[in-house]
Amino acid sequence: MRTKIIAGNWKMNKTVQEGIVLIEEILKSAGKLQHENLQIILAPPFPLLGMASALTSDYRFISISAQNCYYKNNGAFTGEVSPAMIKSTGANHVIIGHSERRMYFHEDNSLLSEKIKVALQNGLTPVYCCGETLSERNEASDYDIIKNQLEETIFSLDEEEIIKIVIAYEPVWAIGTGVNATPEQAQEMHRFIRTQVALKFKDDIAEKIPILYGGSVKPENAYSLFSCTDIDGGLIGGASLNSNDFVAIINS
Ligand code: PGA
């Protein structure tokens, strides 16, 4: 049975003080959140990583994630943060390839591929995001886009590396819009992604890789999405900023 994962992507929200309040609220429910086979990931902004790791260090089912990283370990790259630095805060994961990074910061598959490799070398688990835009879906090129986003990044990994990856399918048209993919639409794409992994690697590798759904997940739609065979949890944006909503989604 694959581990279920609920990850909260805080994006550029919360100061250190606000982050402490949110984490403490989530931890109040921690006793009720601990399920066998469930992992919770919190992805606050860089300046909050050390604090978040320290506050959650007693909770083995909670991991901390960065939202991005650079593809070099150190050097004269003003303003960038390396995977080694992220790891040193106590964080274990890093989101790579979020559509906001692709869109606003022009990150392409070749750069993302470098980031994934360096993150893995530093012991971070990449949460690799893929997803099509609305026009790509309307033009029926969504499957080609996703295939390409996989082929040009994580499909260059070897078997030992791919098994460490978490994939997040996040249709761009569903992110922050309030319009989620229906469970049927999401399941279909998750099945497609798993099949591509099986074709490139092996069936048993594909069966082990967690594939999360992201895009307007809310307490009201979480259960129907997470009940789908190939959906192993969610990457939650807006609803992860409110402890009641986030805890309700975890309990789904
Ligand atoms: P959303 O964001 O839940 O606010 O739609 C998801 C994400 O961008 O990871």
Image (cartoon, grey):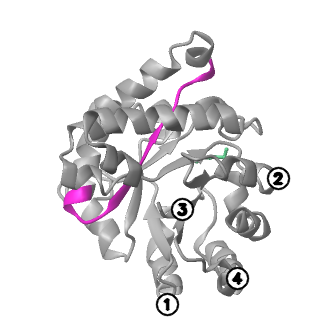
**Lower position in the chain sequence, tag 2 or tag 4:** 4
Amino acid under disc 2: Glu
Q: Of label 3 and label 2, which has the lower sequence position?
A: 3
Find the distance from the CA under tag 1 to the CA under tag 2: 30 Å
Which residue is painted at 54% across and 62% down in the image? Answer: 4
Amino acid identity at mark 4: Lys
Q: Nearer the viewer, mark 1 or mark 2?
A: 2
Q: Residues within 10 Å of mark 3 (few under 14, many from 20)?
A: many
Q: Any atom of ligand 1 within 8 Å of the CB at mark 4?
A: no
Q: Which residue is mark 2?
A: 220
- Whichever of labels 1 and 3 marks the residue nearer the N terminus, that label is 3
Q: Element at badge 2?
A: helix
Q: Earlier in the sequence, mark 4 or mark 3?
A: 3
| Residue annotated with mark 4 | 32
Q: CA distance from mark 2 to mark 4?
A: 19 Å
**Over which residues does the magenta segment extend?**
120-134
The answer to the question of whether label 4 and label 3 lie on touching residues, with beta carbons closer than 8 A, is no
Q: Amino acid at mark 1?
A: Asp
- Label 4, label 3: how many angstroms apart (C-alpha)? 16 Å
Which residue is drawn at the image coordinates 28% and 47% (left, top)? 115
